[in-house]
Image (tube, helix red, strand yellow):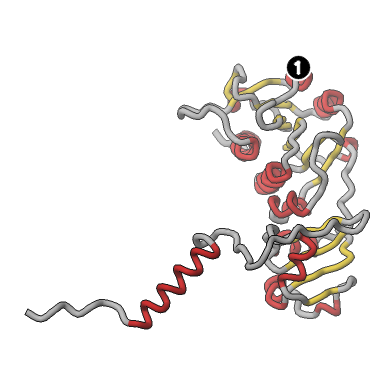
């Protein structure tokens, strides 16, 4: 009997070695790319400006008439993906650069996808400017910008009209928050209040039922949803809602979870509760 023919060719082996080398250097597919060389720390933005990065974030900022952009840095490929055919037509300077130029400003850990803007922060609105929306989110000292960004994304996806935060113990607008929000920062009113309990009283006077999310809440969320205007109130990881907030909301409610884990990350809890609230407002069962 003749030996079985070996599968593969030298060329196949060569490409297999290249793939293994790429995985060793960059991790599995979909993981953030680690560029060669020592890590870069980045630099702070100019006074009064924020640096926002990532294709979705930058495109949404460029489309927002309230966003005052002062500078755009992008690779040629990123400009194409942003749909910027004529950079000279934009009302601010545009620099076509290599990715490392953006790394030097943001740090090598920022997944900027070749696009970054410098811009003025959006000015938070007062509670008195709350638009005629049936659904808002209220955060009680949620400080992690990744969580707040993810919450913003869910809030916009489910049609919430505003995100209410406290002036203290809330993250400032930043590239990290905006990247986690994936463009949602440009599509929702951000409202800052000094005293959350007093703000909740004002929210109630505007016709909202406020539901505080608590893993040990006495009622299931769906059973507390009533009326045609809802304010969902979420607390920080670990600490949850502060006592005064718990005493001020219309009702305390829990997400009913039959599994072994009885609580969710605050951004996941926000998404689930927003889904339930939207179904209630839209007349769903």
Disc 1 designates what residue? 247
Of all residues, the one furthest to the front in this rendering is 38
Residue at 70% x, 51% y is 181
Residue 22 seen: yes
Quarter of the figure with residue 78 = bottom right
The answer to which quarter of the image holds residue 186 is bottom right
Q: Residue furthest right?
A: 47
The residue shown at (75%, 22%) is 242
Q: Nearer the viewer, residue 253 or 128?
A: 253
Whole-percent x, y for residue 54 in the image: 71, 62
Position of residue 267 relative to residue 121, above or below, is above
Give how far across and how far down residue 61 sits, in percent. Answer: 79, 60
Residue 45: x and y in percent read: 86, 58
Quarter of the image with the C terminus in it: top right
- Image vertical order of residue 180 relative to residue 105, above or below: above
The residue lying at 71 percent from left, 71 percent from top is 99
Residue at horizontal 90%, vertical 36%?
128
Q: Which is more toward the observer, 6 or 72? A: 6
Q: Position of residue 175 (x, y in %)?
A: 77, 54
* Secondary structure at numbered mark 1: helix
Does 129 sit left or right of 274 as displayed? right
Q: Residue furthest left?
A: 1
């Amino acid at each position: 009997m003749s030996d079985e023919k070996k599968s593969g060719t030298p060329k196949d082996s060569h490409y297999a070695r290249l793939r293994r080398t790429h995985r060793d250097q960059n991790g599995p597919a979909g993981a953030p790319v680690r560029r060669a060389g020592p890590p870069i720390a980045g630099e702070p933005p100019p006074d009064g400006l924020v640096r926002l990065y990532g294709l979705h974030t930058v495109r949404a900022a460029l489309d927002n008439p309230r966003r005052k952009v002062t500078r755009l840095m992008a690779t040629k490929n990123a400009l194409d993906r942003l749909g910027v055919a004529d950079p000279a037509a934009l009302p601010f300077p545009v620099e076509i650069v290599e990715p490392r130029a953006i790394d030097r400003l943001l740090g090598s850990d920022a997944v900027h996808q070749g696009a970054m803007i410098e811009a003025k922060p959006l000015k938070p609105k007062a509670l008195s400017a709350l638009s005629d929306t049936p659904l808002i989110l209220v955060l009680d000292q949620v400080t992690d910008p990744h969580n707040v960004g993810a919450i913003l994304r869910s809030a916009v996806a489910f049609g919430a009209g505003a995100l209410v935060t406290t002036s203290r113990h809330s993250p400032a607008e930043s590239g990290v928050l905006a990247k986690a929000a994936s463009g949602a920062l440009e599509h929702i009113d951000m409202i800052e209040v000094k005293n959350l309990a007093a703000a909740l009283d004002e929210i109630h006077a505007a016709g909202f039922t406020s539901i505080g999310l608590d893993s040990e809440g006495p009622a299931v969320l769906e059973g507390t949803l009533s009326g045609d205007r809802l304010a969902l109130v979420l607390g920080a990881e670990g600490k949850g809602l502060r006592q005064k907030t718990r005493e001020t909301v219309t009702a305390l409610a829990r997400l009913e979870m039959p599994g072994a884990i009885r609580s969710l990350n605050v951004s996941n809890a926000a998404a689930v509760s927003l889904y339930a609230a939207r179904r209630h407002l839209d007349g769903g069962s």
